[in-house]
Amino acid sequence: MFAAWNPSQPEISDLIIQHDPVTLERLPVRKDDVRSVFAKLGNRQAVKVIDALPNRNGVLDPAAIDKLFVVVHSEMQRLAEEFYHGGRVWELLQAVIAAIRATCAAHNERLRVVDIGCGIGYTVRWLAARTPLAAQGVDLVGMDLNSALIKEAGRLARAENLPCRFVHGDAFSPANSGHIYLSTGVLHHFRGHDLASFFRRHELPETQAFLYYDFQPSFLAAPGSWFFHVVRMRTGLARHDGVLSAVRVHSAETLVSTARDASPGFASGMYGRKIWRTPLPRVFHTLVGIRRPLIPEFRRALGHRIGRLDELA
Amino acid sequence: MTLLALYLLATLDGALCGFRAFAGRSALIYKRMYYTRAMIRGVVSAQVASFLSLFVLLLTAALSQHRAELHADLESTAGRMLWVFLPYAAAVLINIALRALPSTDIRASTSVMVLGPLTGLRPFVMIAGVVYGVWSANLLETKLLGILVLVGMLSLETLLNRIAARMQERDLASAS
């Protein structure tokens, strides 16, 4: 079990789907290649999960992997529902939108909110279903490099007539860039220099803010996540990667210092690290990045929640 | 009365098992009807388990040569089980009620700190309740009936999970 908690290893889901970085075309993945990564680390839990994955002539079956990802993401949505994640995003997002609208007249008509690595699009669909954003002219877009998840997100949105859309592609490309970027549980997938490279890409003229949610590291994160995944999750992949996610997360200090260095056009800081004024950590914390002229209105729009915001610099 | 209380607890447990078995299998946003149907399936399954137990109990009573003693033994056994099951059920219901409070932190905390662990404890609470109940039972029939009830309740969630998995599989197949 503890080899599965080694934060230096990738998650299984990082390896079993590979895309060409330029064309985004799906690449074949050899099962033995993935297996050997975890076998070398003595991670028998991961090896067991990989052994159970269907393959054809040693290459992972893309259709079966896609189906597994949809099942896993449905399970992950259940956790997001239990944590009231949609409401937490809305709490901050409405303050950011109010600040943009009060400060930049140019953005009063059409704002685009882009959820990076949206998976099956829970956050975007929740915002479309439960908030007035779409009626106010805000374009809600979910983006992911995984075409199967994007297809499922689109299907779910259509099934409930939700005013949002999902795009398979690069969230920072000129055609898809957003005024506000969101993500949930994505930042810890960027390791080493990739994290700084990710933040560097935010320096687009139209981009005004980013709100990135991820697990908060704490002494309770690994055992708590392990227990919760054993109780709540059904697939071996979700149980393995969910716990590994919780131990691989970046500290608030790493996130803030990297964001400040790599995207100096934004003031960055953490939001919602503690439950009320107690020392108890929230499961998720949020990295907030916002253009400096927006800060006064953003702080005003936060109202009584201003105490949850650390220093923005 | 104690048997009725056990029956009601089994029905409640069935509803919650139904909810859990179907949770995480539909990624829609509006799911009130979905969960209502899931809980009804759980309640119906609990009725099947309860009435099967009742049928075996009545059959045992009909064949028993000491019916009055069996009745008293069953009542006292069920009463002991309630000492374990009622506090557990109260803890679950209080935490579900706390989710009505308008605080996302409190509502999420009920999941993380209480309802999640209570779900993990459920099989152990079932076993502890039945063992505590039948430990002091006088008649073999009572002990066997207790074990039958335990098997029924422990099988309930597995059965519901299988039904939910099959329905999810069907939904995924029709979507692709």
Image (spheres, coloured by chain):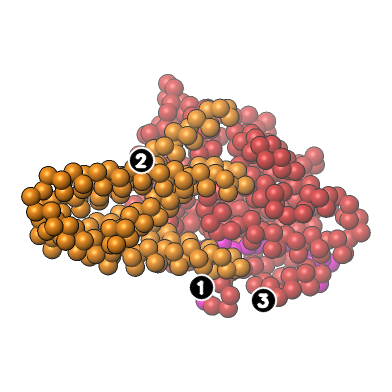
Chain colours: A red, B orange
Q: CA distance from mark 1 to mark 3?
A: 15 Å
Q: CA distance from mark 1 to mark 2?
A: 38 Å
Q: Dot 1 lies on which element?
A: loop
Image point (81%, 64%), residue name? A99
A2 left or right of B68 in image: right
| Residue B40 appears anywhere in the view | yes
Q: Around disc 3, counting alpha carbons within 10 Å, would you say few (fewer than 14), some (14 to 19), or many (20 or more)? A: few
Q: Amino acid at mark 3?
A: Gly
Q: Which residue is nearer to you in this view: A217 or B161?
A: B161
Q: What residue would you read off at disc 3?
A: A307
Q: What residue would you read off at disc 1?
A: A280
Residue A285, magenta (yes or no): yes
State the extent of the magenta-drawn residues as a range.
A279-296
Q: Around disc 2, counting alpha carbons within 10 Å, would you say few (fewer than 14), some (14 to 19), or many (20 or more)? A: some
Quarter of the image with the C terminus of chain B is top right
Q: Which residue is nearer to you in this view: B62 or A102?
A: B62
Mark sitting on residue B159:
2
Callouts 1 and 2 in the same chain: no
Chain letter of the residue beneath label 3 in the structure image? A
> Residue B5: x, y in percent?
33, 60
Q: Dot 2 lies on which element?
A: helix
Chain letter of the residue beneath label 1 in the structure image? A
> Residue B142: x, y in percent?
15, 54
A174 left or right of A283 in image: right
A276 left or right of A295 in image: left
Q: Dot 3 lies on which element?
A: helix
Q: Which residue is nearer to you in this view: A49 or A79?
A: A79
